[in-house]
Amino acid sequence: CCCCCCCCSSSSLFVANAFLRPFSFSSHARTHGTPRSGVMSSVNATEAFLDETLRVAKRCAFLAGKEISNAWGTSSSLVKNSKKNDVDLVTATDEKCEKMIKECISEAFPEHSIVGEEETARAGDVIPQMSAQPTWYVDPVDGTTNFIHSYPNSCVSIGLCVNEEPVVGVVFNPISREMFVGVKGRGSQLIKVGGRNLDEEMEVQSIQVSTTDALKKALIATEIGVGRDEKTINAIMGRIRNIVQKSRSVRCTGSCAMNMCAVASGRVDGYFEIGFGGPWDNCAATVIVRESGGVVVDPSGEEMHLNARRVLCANSREIVEEFVAALKPVEDGPAEPPKPSLATTL
């Protein structure tokens, strides 16, 4: 991997520098919810750290995005093997992109930890416990089933945690050529990407969550996961039924990270899922949602824990409360992870 500490062209560097400088939350973001403060004081004092990690995250996303784009519709997008069952799939592109990203991050930050989806799966699906050490969470292809079927809603997701808090997030869908970026304390952006190598930032705009003020007016996203036993399916469908009855409509598009970015950009008003793969699915997008003014919690209403494999996010605390209340009557299925307070290991 080539040096990861700078952007790929003078045009992309010029656009990126505007985001590398800190700026304040908008009044909208302050109204609808901001990330926790105080946990990151040492890193907040070092703007250079956030600048450098953002550059590397974007560089890695550009590299993996180009690989995904090149493999789209080819034999590299075919199923290589499965993990938990026949609907939890892996392709050669997943593995190649994860290796590429890990090499890129390790070259720039050899002292940082890296947790990747495919490597964790090969190690028995044991998610490492979180620590104060800078830790990157990498999903090389979030939306693998979409990728296999050439359904254009797959992305690379790269998030960084420090002191167990997500602080930098980059989510890139190379098919739609949209990159979502969030940095703690600086807000979130949508970047339209172009160029032959998919590494030029053509248009940059700040994003914010929607202003929808009630669940009954909300468009909600969710996913059905990979559990296929009858009781788990009943739990999944029970929650969907409750949300359908209480919201405007529901969408299911196949990617946790992209769904959360849809909340951050105001395309949908809320999203929930119980039982996705791991923290690589929602680490990056958690920063992006919070920095766009959104709220991220556990579907039970508890504080969200990245290792719990559960998330609920929405544009405001008010909708979160309605959302949680609508889900509460449905018990978790046997194949679904418990809420953080009941989890034996996180």
Image (tube, grey):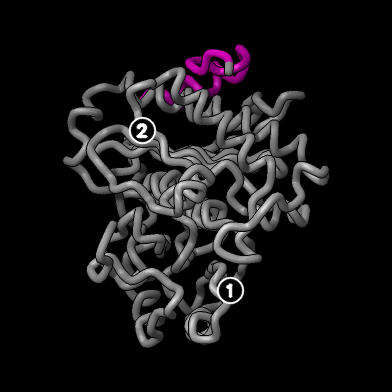
Relative to residue 288, is residue 306 drawn left or right? left
Residue wearing tag 2: 113
Residue wearing tag 1: 250
Task: Report the quarter where the C terminus lies.
Answer: bottom left
Q: Position of residue 111 (x, y in %)?
A: 33, 23
Task: Report the quarter where the N terminus lies.
Answer: top right
Q: Which residues are magenta?
A: 2-22
Which circle's residue, 1 or 2, is located before the other in the chain? 2
Q: Position of residue 128 (x, y in %)?
A: 34, 47
Give SS at disc 1.
Answer: strand
Give whichever of 84, 201 is nearer the camera. Answer: 84
Residue 183 visible in the shown view: no
The kind of residue on which mark 1 rests is Val
Relative to residue 7, is residue 289 drawn left or right? left
Relative to residue 137, is residue 346 drawn left or right? left
Give whichever of 247, 252 is nearer the camera. Answer: 252
